[in-house]
Image: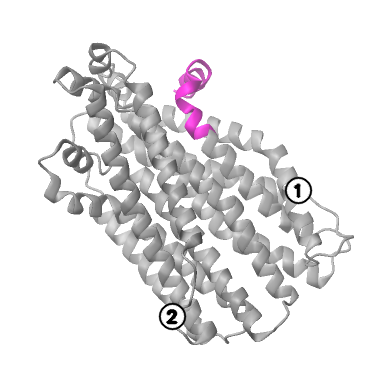
Amino acid sequence: MFAMALRNVRFQPGRLVSTLLAAFLGAGIVMAFASMFDTRSGPGVDETSGTSLEIAANVVGGYGTLLVFFSVASTMTVNVRQRAPELALLRSAGATPGQVRRMVIGESAVVALVGAALAVVPAWFGGRALLDVFKDTDQVAADVDYVFGTMALSMGFGTTLVAAVGGAFLAVRRATRSAIGRPEQPRTRGRLITAGVLAVVAVGLLAATDTLESDDPLLMAPAGYGAILLSVGLGMLAPTLLRFLTAPARGTLSGMTLRQGADRQSGVFLPLVSFVGMATGTLYIQTVASDTMKAAGVSQTVDDKNIETLNLVVVGIIVVFACVMLINGLYAATSERVREFGQLRLAGATPRQVLVTVFAEGLALTVLGVVLGTGAAVTGILAYSRARTGDLVPELSPALWIVIAAIAVASTLVTTLGTARHVLRVPAVEAASTGA
């Protein structure tokens, strides 16, 4: 089966492009930040520089790795679901569930390793650019040499490989159960439990802001982490909330497809809610901190500059990654609906009507994702503002949120409509027979 996996990767690489992209971007981000560990252990690094490098590697690398893991695993889930007819055919031909799992996991491992290998050179340049940013802001001494070594490589390859293999294992397990006629186990309970655990941890982190001094540079950490974990939890609950919210529209075509495809969109909600929550929370928390220091006439310390730089880097890299994964997930989720669109057209729907349905679905997904992400971000902003300034609600301009929401809306609608238009070019009869 592993030999078959290698042949599948060689002769059908197109269907694995989304997974390769996720692995490439994820490994690149993890290795770039993990290289700060290697640089820290290099010769001639003073204590102040070493602290700055450790904070960058631990703080950003920590939840960056978590986001990468979820994104790669989610992409693998979509990829396996698209191959359900192929896996069912293999089962009908006599392949055992174990053989099918080994084949898919083998493919995932190969793609993850290739993606990580391709990311080594970009990650080297990315880590070097990150170090230059720290030098330019006087957080790291100018004579510190950049090192890209074993920590960067091991964390990059390890995280990407574990995420791809783990995601493939869980997805193919469900696919093989369905292929032999066994009902797929409901995942609502697992999502509820996971989301509940994340919510409890998030509340604990937000409450921890009251235990720190108002001028403590680490005050941002619990507020930011709490908002991020809460956004991940809400992203996991989004499919269940979508089914509940679309209940009044169950008699419409868009309402029915949204309810039926709620699980299919689960891989889209996580990067969407995470993107909005992380960008909104991080930028506004930093804005509150900067405005407070300006109002008090206090100059920024090295620690303040360090955290501000980290926040901007987080928004500039991790959030871009989440946005790319959102587009990747939307493209994959819409592309697999070839047969559904073909059947709708054979039933009398025009291409324009199908596009209107897709637009309505995309708009509903975006609104729910923006609302959930914003809600998660607001909790972190309020907790930080109360601890830092004593005021629960800070005076902030909505301009940043409008830009973030606009990016989310544009990414969702442009990707879904563009992909749907491409799918509708397939003749209706041919599309309806796809995967049959």
Q: What element carries label 2?
A: helix
Question: Is 37 placed above or below 341 here?
Answer: below
Identified at 55% across, 74% down, the residue is: 288
x, y percentage for residue 118? 65, 33
Of the two numbered discs 2 and 1 on the same chain, state the one appearing first in sequence.
Answer: 1
Stretch of the chain drawn in magenta: 1-20
x, y percentage for residue 303? 71, 74
Crowdedness near tag 1: few (<14), some (14–19) or many (≥20) residues, C-alpha within 10 Å: some
x, y percentage for residue 430? 27, 12
Tags 2 and 1 touching, CB below 8 Å: no
Indicate yes or no whether the magenta region holds residue 116.
no
The answer to whether any part of residue 5 appears in the image is yes
> Is 421 on the left-hand or right-hand side of 213?
left
Quadrant (top left/top right/bottom left/bottom right) for the C terminus: top left
Which amino acid type corresponds to the residue marked 1 in the rendered image?
Answer: Gly
Q: Mark 2 points at which residue?
A: 207
Identify which residue, 62 or 424, lies in the foreground: 424
Q: Mark 1 points at which residue?
A: 149
Q: In which quarter of the image is residue 294?
A: bottom right
Identified at 43% across, 79% down, the residue is: 393
